[in-house]
Image (spheres, rainbow, N blue to C red):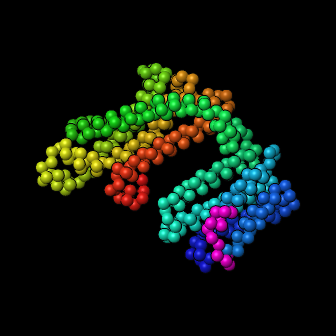
Amino acid sequence: MNRTGLTAMQFALALLAGGAALLGLAFGFTSFGSAPQLTVFFALGAASLLRLALPFSLWLDGALMLFGAVALILALPEEGAMPAHFWWALVASWAFAWLFVERLSAAIRAGHLPETGTGLVIPVIFGLALLVAWEVITRGANVPPVLLPPPSAIWARMTAEVPTLWADFVQTFVKSVLPGYAIGCLAGLAVAIAVDRSPFLKAGVMPIGNFMSALPIIGIAPIMVMWFGFDWQSKAAVVVAMTFFPMLVNTVAGLNAASAIERDLMHTYAANNWQTLMKLRLPAAGPFIFNALKINSTLALIGAIVAEFFGTPIVGMGFRISTGVGRLAIDLVWAEIAVAAIAGSAFYGVIALIERGVTFWHPSVRGGRT
């Protein structure tokens, strides 16, 4: 921490942001009439160097970050490459974003700001900064849309293809992922409880479970399509195969998490095997079970999408991605990827919230981590 109140990293970012704004002001001096908003951003960004002598609020860094990103996107040329000072605007805006997140995180750790609510700003800012950089680089460098379309084009395609995207979501997520996920996880949990009661099954099934977990999905999917047909049933079967063994392995490990002292205590209370399982061993295995549920939430979606590459009706996320690549409709492919990412993140988040309510006693939850 130096006399400005900034750490070494924050000081370097402040110099980078202010210096980039100053360079942008110099490089674009002759062409500011076409982008007056960038002129204002460069002037304010260069003025932020006064933080070396005067106090400078972290929220001012956030405001400069936001203003710079908006000004840059509004000033992007419709055709042709960006002028040099536009790139300095991108560097300055990105540096202000990084500096804001660094200072915000430090303020939360120091207890100056509440973590609840404020902590959500950090991932939101990080995600928006990536989207802005993606938009500026693809449009400013004239990247061919067939290689990488800008987020604005992807969003336009998403809004134009809502019925198609919804039908694909229902086919893949609702019909394939959810049933396969439920069957695979419940079957893995039940078999794990049965295996735990038998040393013979534990010695025989666990190595097989570890072996099956390593099987590639591209080897399983065609077989399931041959067995169950081209509709959603074969994709759900792939999801069952992918989610069963992670749940089995994690649950068996979790059932052994209860210590010998705790099991002896249940024995002194005259608890039978079922009572010990329900009141001690399954609650102790809760973090392991939820860990498997969270892992499986992403595996299930990946499995269903990849399985659709090997045969499906003319609907589904995997079908749309494979055909979209063949027709060079890359914006539609990215729209499907965005829908899958949103659905998978929401699915994972719901399970994480349930975990916080069920395993509230666990140290990781008490510490605010999931």
State the extent of the magenta-drawn residues as a range: 52-64
Q: Which residue is drawn at 47% across and 26% down?
A: 232
User: Would you say residue 55 sits in the magenta stretch?
Assistant: yes
Q: Determine if the magenta segment contains residue 17.
A: no
The image shows residue 88 at horizontal and vertical percentages of: 74, 59
Q: In this view, does 273 lie above or below 180?
A: below
Where is 61 relative to 193, above or below?
below
Instruction: Name which quarter of the figure residue 289 lies in.
Output: top left
Residue 8, horizontal then vertical, whole percent? 59, 71
Work out whether 225 lies above or below 116: above
Q: Where is residue 358 in the image (x, y as percent from the top left)?
A: 35, 50
- Residue 243 in picture, x, y percent from top left: 40, 37
Name the side, left or right, on which 337 lies relative to 134.
Answer: left
Please tell me in which quadrant of the rendered image residue 92 appears: bottom right
Q: Is residue 105 visible?
A: yes
Magenta span dominant secondary structure: helix
Residue under the point 34% across and 52% down: 359
Left or right: residue 302 versus residue 358 is: right
Residue ID at (71%, 50%): 136
Q: Which of 210 and 24 is in front in this view?
A: 24
Q: Count every numbered label the image shows and give the total.
A: 0
To which quarter of the image does residue 83 belong?
Answer: bottom right
- Left or right relative to 61: residue 237: left
Viewer-proximal residue among 10 and 126: 126
Q: Which residue is drawn at 56% across and 75% down?
A: 1
Res. 216 visible in picture: no
